[in-house]
Image (cartoon, grey):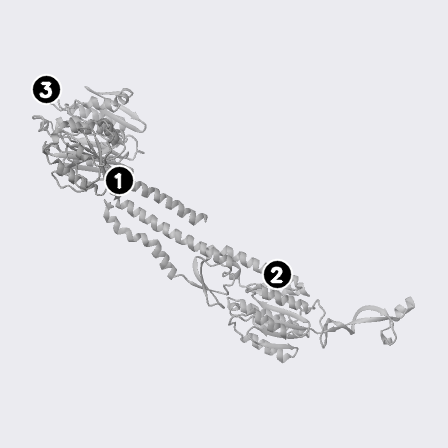
């Protein structure tokens, strides 16, 4: 077991505080000279005193355990126990002749003593292997270790499992693989990308990958994923760790319009849906798959039931989902012919939003990034990444820390790293966290019962 | 309030024992033996040899029968006072109250011309006496005695029982915070011997309320061992145990023809008044 915030472990001695206090206070207990302890020595007192002593020690132990749980919660433990990992291995022809095997060995090292299910995406075979077994890429028979013919799941079915469990994907970054990932990426998942050319370890983050995280609510984390494909080389192999957790949204931000096809709009909208905010994105004009994503993820039903909101030449959709509101605009800052950027539109939109939500609130909660139209020129592939976002808190009671969002957004646009966060094995963190929380609650209940009722 | 002045306050009070006591000297208590006194008891037919002075001539005039008047002789009585001077009595004002009670009772009985005896658990014993000097010595002793040592009820009560030679009045002044079976044995023995026993249970208010708080180590004034307990938790149980103890004691006194009077802080006078009102 290792810890993501090991510094909190320095607080571990504090867990012994109840015990120390008890012992300290015991030493300082006053001596009461009483006339006679004849009555206090009686048998029924003795039995009761033993019970009380037991009860007291139980309370102390419970308190120590409670403190331990809190400290462990803060230190965010993760484990590599006897856990099964699903590794989706791309054994397609593009992987042939690359440093895949070496990479896979390194990948398997990450799992430590855990067992791994390796799925060959080319043939769809599932193999179970101990980490000591190093599979040969493209040769499924060599993977086969335990004599059982495994289940042959269709690729899509495998991907559907992303929603429920962790998955490791070992693939190169050709378009097909990215599409495969993106189409199956759940709205509440986040993705970690490892560059095999970087240093591979459990904390591995490639220099090409930037992560931004902020906490929107106590239980809602945002991880902003920024993969700068400008530096991307096609012969790089990537493997991805997809986590699934309801509290996490995804946004993949692109800088190259072609790649944005797969990594742009859909997760962002879903992200917005899950965060009680109005968001307006400016997807790339070449984001031809946008509609496909909507269809695939049943966004059409949302949109059809929503109110159409016209703004100048463009129109958006106001989608309500409980407290959540998504103001969705599909407009193109790039014009395929003239490549103009409609500042006028943004201004009119800003005015409308002020009218809708109030100027003060909008000022507080809105982020507008004006784009320099001059930078929006040039051939495709050399345009800078442009993100324009409006975040308007729907209700004050919705505690989205929009100021933070603004900061992140602006920093993101300025290409600054706000916070590099390693979330490898977050699922294990989450499961331990959940366990610790339940354990803490249980301890608290027990302690209350002991103190007040027994 | 010193002992002498306190005791003098009760010196004018008059008390009579319910029981017949025998004694050598004429006193204010009825003797078990008939004698010459002013207190008439009954008539009986004249028999040869009876003193003619006691023939009731008025009855003869009315009934034409010789009837002899019988009188009960009034005697003094022996009062045995047992004083517990063990360490536990030194708690708070317990011993002071015990001394006040003992002094008042001794003086009271002394002024009634009764013979008073004092037995203390520290080994002091003054045989029944009515001499002024002896009484003074008892008071001197009471003024200087300090509670100490452990109380061995079995030994003390058996020793005390042996020193009670005649019928009389037995007064126990103690906190009775020890095994009640010894007291029961003593009371039963006293009843068998026709001694009336009155107990004064001297307790302090702290013993009766157990006002201690939190965890503490309790040490008895007589015991060497210590007990570690949480007073808040044990209070209810202690008070219950004390109540039961008092109830058992009262029961033993009652069933053996005695009385138990409770005296706690600053309620000595109240306890004595109850004694005089209840026993006399």
Q: Is mark 2 on a helix, strand or loop?
A: helix
Position of residue B261 in the picture relative to residue A388 (left or right): right
The crowding category of the residue bearing disc 1, from other C-alpha atoms within 10 Å (few below 14, some 14 to 19, many at least 20), is few
Both on one chain, marks 1 and 3? yes
Q: Distance between the residues labelled 1 and 3?
A: 54 Å
Q: How far apart are marks 1 and 2 (CA)?
A: 73 Å
User: Which is nearer the eye, A14 or A284?
Assistant: A14
Q: In x, y percent, where is residue A410?
A: 17, 35
Furthest residue to the bottom?
A: B133
Residue under numbered circle 2? B250
**Whether residue B136 is situated above or below residue A31 in the rendered picture:** below
Q: Is mark 1 on a helix, strand or loop?
A: loop
Q: In x, y percent, where is residue A186?
A: 24, 30
- Residue B270, by quadrant, is bottom right
**Whether residue B220 is situated above or below residue A13 in the rendered picture:** below
Q: In x, y percent, where is residue B75?
A: 73, 74
- Residue A336, by quadrant, is top left
Residue under numbered circle 3? A337
Residue under numbered circle 1? A83
The disc, 1 or 3, on the residue closer to the chain's N-terminal end is 1
């Amino acid at each position: 077991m290792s810890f993501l915030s090991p510094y909190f472990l320095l607080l571990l001695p504090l867990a012994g505080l109840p015990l120390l206090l008890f012992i300290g206070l015991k030493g300082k207990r006053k001596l009461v000279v009483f006339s006679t302890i004849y009555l206090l020595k009686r048998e029924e007192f003795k039995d009761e005193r033993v019970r009380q002593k037991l009860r007291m020690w139980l309370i102390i132990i419970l308190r120590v355990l409670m403190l331990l749980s809190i400290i462990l919660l803060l230190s965010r433990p993760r484990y590599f126990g006897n856990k099964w990992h699903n590794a989706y291995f791309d054994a397609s022809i593009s992987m042939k002749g690359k440093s895949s095997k070496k990479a896979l060995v390194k990948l398997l090292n990450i799992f430590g003593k855990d067992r791994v299910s390796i799925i060959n995406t080319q043939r769809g075979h599932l193999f179970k292997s101990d980490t000591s077994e190093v599979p040969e890429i493209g040769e499924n028979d060599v993977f086969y270790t335990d004599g059982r013919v495994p289940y042959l799941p269709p690729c899509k079915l495998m991907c559907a499992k992303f929603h429920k469990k962790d998955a490791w994907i070992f693939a190169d970054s050709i378009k097909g693989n990215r599409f495969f990932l993106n189409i199956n990426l759940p709205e509440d998942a986040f993705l970690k990308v490892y560059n095999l050319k970087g240093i591979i370890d459990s904390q591995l983050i490639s220099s090409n990958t930037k992560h931004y995280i902020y906490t929107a609510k106590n239980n809602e984390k945002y991880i902003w994923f920024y993969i700068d494909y400008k530096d991307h080389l096609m012969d790089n192999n990537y493997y991805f760790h997809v986590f699934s957790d309801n509290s996490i949204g995804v946004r993949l931000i692109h800088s190259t319009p072609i790649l944005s096809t797969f990594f742009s709009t859909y997760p962002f909208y879903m992200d917005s849906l899950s965060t009680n905010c109005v968001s307006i994105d400016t997807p790339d004009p070449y984001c031809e798959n946008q509609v496909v994503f909507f269809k695939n993820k049943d966004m059409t039903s949302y949109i059809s039931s929503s109110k159409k909101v016209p703004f100048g030449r463009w129109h958006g959709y106001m989608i309500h989902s409980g407290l959540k509101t998504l103001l969705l605009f599909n407009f193109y800052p790039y014009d395929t012919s003239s490549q103009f950027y409609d500042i006028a539109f943004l201004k009119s939109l800003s005015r409308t939003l002020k009218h809708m939500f109030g100027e003060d609130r909008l000022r507080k909660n809105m982020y507008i990034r004006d784009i320099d139209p001059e930078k929006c020129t040039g051939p495709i592939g050399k345009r800078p990444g442009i993100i324009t976002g409006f975040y308007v808190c729907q209700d004050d009671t919705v505690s989205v820390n929009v100021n933070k969002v603004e900061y992140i957004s602006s920093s993101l646009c300025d290409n600054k790293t706000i916070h590099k966060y390693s979330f490898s094995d977050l699922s294990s963190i989450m499961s331990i966290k959940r366990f610790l929380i339940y354990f803490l609650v249980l301890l608290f209940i027990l302690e209350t019962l002991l103190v007040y009722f027994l | 309030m010193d002992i002498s002045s306190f005791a003098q306050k009760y010196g004018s009070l008059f008390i009579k024992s319910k029981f017949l006591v025998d004694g050598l000297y004429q006193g204010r208590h009825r003797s078990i033996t008939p004698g010459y006194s002013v207190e008439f008891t009954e008539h009986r037919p004249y028999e040869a040899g009876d003193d003619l002075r006691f023939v009731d001539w008025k009855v003869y005039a009315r009934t034409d029968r010789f009837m002899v008047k019988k009188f009960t002789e009034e005697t003094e009585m022996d009062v045995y006072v047992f004083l517990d001077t063990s360490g536990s009595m030194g708690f708070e004002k317990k011993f002071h109250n015990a001394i006040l009670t003992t002094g008042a009772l001794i003086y009271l009985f002394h002024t009634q011309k009764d013979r008073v005896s004092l037995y203390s658990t520290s080994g002091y014993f003054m045989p029944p006496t009515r001499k002024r000097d002896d009484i003074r010595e008892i008071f001197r002793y009471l003024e200087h005695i300090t509670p100490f040592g452990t109380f061995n009820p079995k030994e003390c009560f058996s020793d005390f029982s042996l020193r009670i030679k005649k019928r009389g009045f037995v007064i126990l002044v103690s906190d009775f915070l020890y095994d009640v079976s010894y007291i029961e044995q003593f009371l039963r023995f006293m009843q068998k011997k026709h001694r009336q026993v009155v107990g004064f249970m001297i307790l302090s208010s702290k013993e009766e309320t157990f006002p201690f708080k939190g965890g503490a180590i309790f040490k008895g004034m007589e015991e060497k061992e210590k007990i570690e307990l949480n007073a808040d938790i044990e209070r209810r149980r202690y008070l219950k145990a004390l109540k039961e103890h008092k109830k058992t004691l009262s029961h033993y006194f009652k069933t053996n023809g005695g009385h138990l009077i409770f005296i706690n802080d600053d309620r000595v006078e109240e306890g004595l008044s109850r004694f005089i009102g209840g026993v006399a």
